[in-house]
Amino acid sequence: MQSLKYILKQQQKLLRPANLLFAMESRFFSTQKITQINQLTAISPIDGRYARQSHELRNFFSEYALMRYRVFVELEWFKRLFQEQITGFSDKEIQFIIEQQPFLDKIFSEFSLEDAERVKQIEATTNHDVKAIEYFLKEKFDLNKEGLAKYKEYLHFSCTSEDINNLAYALMVHHSLREVVIPSMQNLFGKLDSLAQQYAEIPMMSRTHGQSATPTTVGKELANFAYRINRQLKELEKIIPTGKFNGAVGNLNAHKVAYPERDWLKISQKFVEGLGIEWNPYTTQIEPHDTIAQISLNISLTNTILIDFSRDMWSYISLGYFKQKNVKGEIGSSTMPHKINPIDFENAEGNLGMANALFTHFAQKLPISRFQRDLSDSTVMRNIGVAFSYTMQSVKALEKGLSRVEINEEVLKNELDSHYELLAEPVQTVMRKYDIPNPYELLKEFTRGKKVEKSDYLKFVEQLALPEVEKQMLRDLTPQSYIGYAAELARSVKKL
């Protein structure tokens, strides 16, 4: 009994240092103070590991970019008020505002990180991000030596925050699509189209249900994806974000009270459309985000097509249809030295899924708001750039992956040559043409579940009651030549 107690006591002594060490390690990790923000300290991989691939989108979706777009909308509205001569000021005063346009434009064009930090300082007091923009602009007006400060109360005139926000986000999305997202996807389409042309006549065995099926060409299979992507891009280019500028609940109440003689509906329309955004006259406090949902659904579908492509490329590499290039210095596995893994296609598949999780949420969440508005859309809208970034990371990964593979014609040829059962389809079709009874059933008996050699195929053709010209055509036919219009379709995808 004493020996058992002794053993238990010794075990506790041994365990105590381990528990103490664990506690020390936990405290060590949890007490590290990381204050510097860079690619190594970022929580999101978008700003960390993948920062290089998505840096172009910072100009549109960073906190700084959102502030800058808000500044732009506020200043454009200020200028519009005087352009429309709604203020009741004299011609001389209106001319003064027009002459101050270079000063106003400079506030936006030279909006710096220091300016953004000043906005954040103001927001620390106001606890309201858009009001902080207004106060920041008033500070800028106070610095104007020509007396612009006299008119600073016309900043944010009759506006609700969402008048500014919805147009800022609409412009952010619209500009990022035109300048980054669509061009990047068009580049990927161009790469696929180029490869489709290059491999238009390279035959390969297709697979339906994972089993050997009618031959196609490498180019045609790439063209399938190129066509699908291009079709979605054309639809995406048609979507113009909608915007509103109509006050607290969408009725321009304050505007009409202040200047009842003016046609505020027309002024609102001219202002929104003047920014390149489609005007939405029917809103609550918020623009309902229907076009943002449309864009999200479109990109989500495009991403789904790219997931399909990523998985097919992964599978073709696994089958040996494509060879991966050996890049000197790179490592595929930490324990298996021989490995070259299809990591770019795997990376794309994973990040496209991340993007789609967000885009799907945008489409389902953003068009819904309680009564005349709730704030739940605000935090969701801040993540639009994240979804775009995951998409761009994936597009670039696919381009990189395509640049690192080349077709393996030997594997493709050998596989087709060993599957003459693939010609059961054309044989039974020609037999039907000449009214030979039970053609499908005869070929089923000859080929189903079997691997047919060329010699067996030729013997079968010889015993058919067909005209000699048809027999010769079938004798000459091979799995490599039985590709239908695949080559023509591969070459034509850009024209369709």
Image (tube, helix red, strand yellow):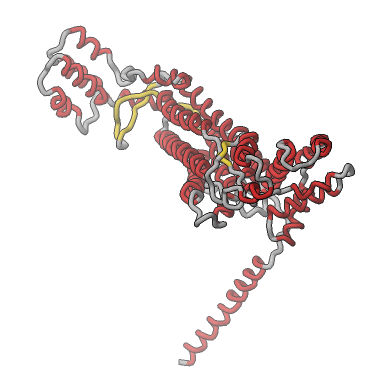
Which of the image's four quarters has the N terminus?
A: bottom left
Of residue 139 and residue 58, the one placed in the foreground of this image is: 139
Name the residue nearer the viewer: 13 or 408.
Answer: 408
> Which residue shows up at 71% across the image and 37% down it?
84
> Can see residue 490?
yes
Residue extending farthest to the right is 145
Q: Position of residue 115 (x, y in %)?
A: 78, 48
Residue 90, picture quadrant: top right
Q: Is residue 309 above or below residue 27?
A: above
Residue 379 shown left or right of residue 488 in the figure? right
For residue 2, above or below residue 267:
below
Query: Looking at the image, which residue is at 57% across and 42% down?
Result: 388
Residue 273 placement (x, y as % from top left):
61, 35
Residue drawn at the location 65% of the way across and 45% of the way down: 260
- Image location (x, y in percent) of residue 317: 44, 34
Q: What residue occupies the far front of the structure in this picture?
A: 261
Q: Toward the viewer: 443 or 388?
A: 388
Residue 451 is left or right of residue 415, and the answer is left
Query: x, y percentage for residue 241?
Result: 56, 38
Q: Residue furthest left?
A: 437
Name the residue rendered at 79%, 50% in the picture: 138
Q: In front: 302, or 82?
A: 82
Q: Residue furthest bottom?
A: 2
How many numbered tags mark residues here? Answer: 0
